[in-house]
Image: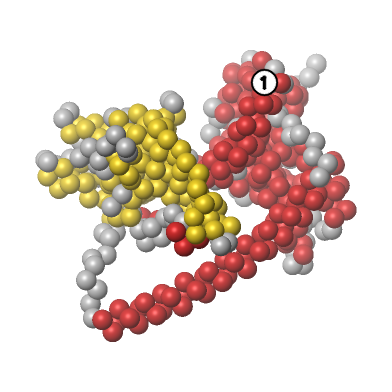
Amino acid sequence: MPTPDETLERRMRAAAPRPDAAGDMLERLVARKRRRAVMRKVGTIVAVVVLIGGTLAAFAAVGAGPATQPAAPSPSQSDAMGALGLPYPICDISTMPLPTEKGPGSAAVFTRGTDEGCPKAFADKTVDVGVDLNGDGTLDATTGPVPDCFIKCEAFAVADLNNDGMPEIAVSNQGADGYGVYVYAIKTSPPSIAPITKDGDPFQFAWAAVAAHADAAHCEMSDRGKGVLVLTDATFEPPDASVDSVSYLIEGTIATKVGKDHTTVPLDQAPEPTDQLCGAPIHGSAGGV
Amino acid sequence: MDESDIRRFLHESYPQVVGAVALVAGDLATAEDAVQEAIVRAWERTDRGDQIDDLDGWVAAVAMNLSRSRLRHLRVERRARPRLVAAATIDGPTPDAIDVRRALSTLPRRQREAAVLRFYLGCTTEETASAMGTSHGTVKSQLAKARAHLAVALGVPDTDEESRHADA
């Protein structure tokens, strides 16, 4: 008679997906190792160039006097139990301005605390997002949990992604090599916030720039005069970049794929993450990428 | 570590480690990519003179961490989708496999990792704790919760005193 643990073991073994046998796996790993070595060299060169460029820019800025462009506002981050008018303690709060017709509101990303305080391990945390639509310091609507908060989730941007006059709330989750961004739709009357979905799953896009690859997003007007969000996936193949683009129309809480494209552009024209999303500043640790 | 060690790993351990990561990540393509990346990283470390005593455990632990990256998941999924669709139409999982994967997917990530390391890869609680970078006590707690959940979800009696003692 097998023990319950033996039963679990047997059933897990039977359930585990099996990879295809790949006779050339060693060759593929050798190639991958070489590719990583090249990437590191490219990354080092890019870092040096950025450092030199940044230094020169700093000297130029000092020579030109005070900067005329205001810096993007930073998210306010603090640990506060019972803040924002919620009936439970919260912590890991990051906020960003959310101007509405009701006033200077804000959007907040926060972790639900417990009576014992803020969970220490992110695996134990439930991260929600909420909006204060009139600036009275109280969240009028919340939703959650934000998916995939394995490392850190935080406020990302308040941006009008579909050009309908009402901003969407973007929340980032930090991954090993960049960010995933989830998007939320809001209404002012009655106050609500809800995740935008695509085919029933939370709508998200990647925001990352590594040595030979970049994922980003920007807004465009479609041929039919509607605002669309274009997600780009660029692979750098000097002297060019291969760019896959997918366009989404966001209506209410539904994102619908309305187009896709593949182009090759000169490397310096490849779409990459910037410090803005559709004209709105990027907040949090992804800001100023 | 040299090519003969890599060949040994690919021949003896690769399918099982990929299966473990796939059970945790819920996606075979992500698991394959993460395990291959982990093998290469292990190879690079040993090239630099580092010692890796338990290659299977090291690769499994690193691959599980790598598979957490949602961006990696998205990119790999995009590249692998045509292949996965083709494979699924030829040889889909059995109903019991679907039940097990679904039961695992409803566990919190850390419990899922603990359960797969312990039950699927056969790690001791000490080895599981080491792979997860956490304490022996935390792993025991995670395993107890995972076992109880899986017992209900899969109709397995959760009365294994012997294994509880073994975890202790």
The one nearer the camera, B46 or A211, is A211
Q: Residue at x 62, y 32 (%)?
A: B82
Describe residue B167's horizontal placement relative to residue A2 as left or right. left
Say which quarter of the image contains residue A67: bottom left
- Above or below: residue A52 compared with residue A206: below
Q: Which residue is the site of mark 1?
A: B89
Label 1, residues with CA under 10 Å away: few <14, some 14-19, many ≥20: few
Q: Position of residue B97 (x, y in %)?
A: 68, 21
**Identity of the residue drawn at 46% across and 38% down:** A260
Give the x, y percent position of residue B161.
Answer: 70, 25
| Residue furthest bottom in the image | A63
Instruction: Examine the image and state in which quarter residue A239 appears.
Output: bottom right
**Chain under disc 1:** B
Give me the residue at 68% from left, 63% from top. A37
Residue type at the position of mark 1: Thr
Q: Percent x, y for residue B47? A: 77, 64
Residue A158, given in percent of the width and then of the height, sits at: 28, 46
Screen quadrant of the N terminus of chain A: top right
Tell me if I can see residue A156 in this picture: yes
Count of numbered circles on the image: 1
Which residue of the protein is positioned furthest toward the left in this rendering?
A102
- Horizontal placement of A214 versus B91: left or right? left
Instruction: Decide: is A140 above or below B9.
Output: above
The colour scheme of the drawn protein is secondary structure
- Of helix, strand and loop, which one carries label 1? helix
Foreground pick, B8 / A68? A68
Q: Quadrant of the C terminus of chain A?
A: bottom left
Asked whether, in this view, residue A244 is left or right of residue B118, the answer is left
Task: Identify the residue shown where x is 52% and y is 74%.
Answer: A48
User: Does residue B120 appear in this view?
Assistant: no
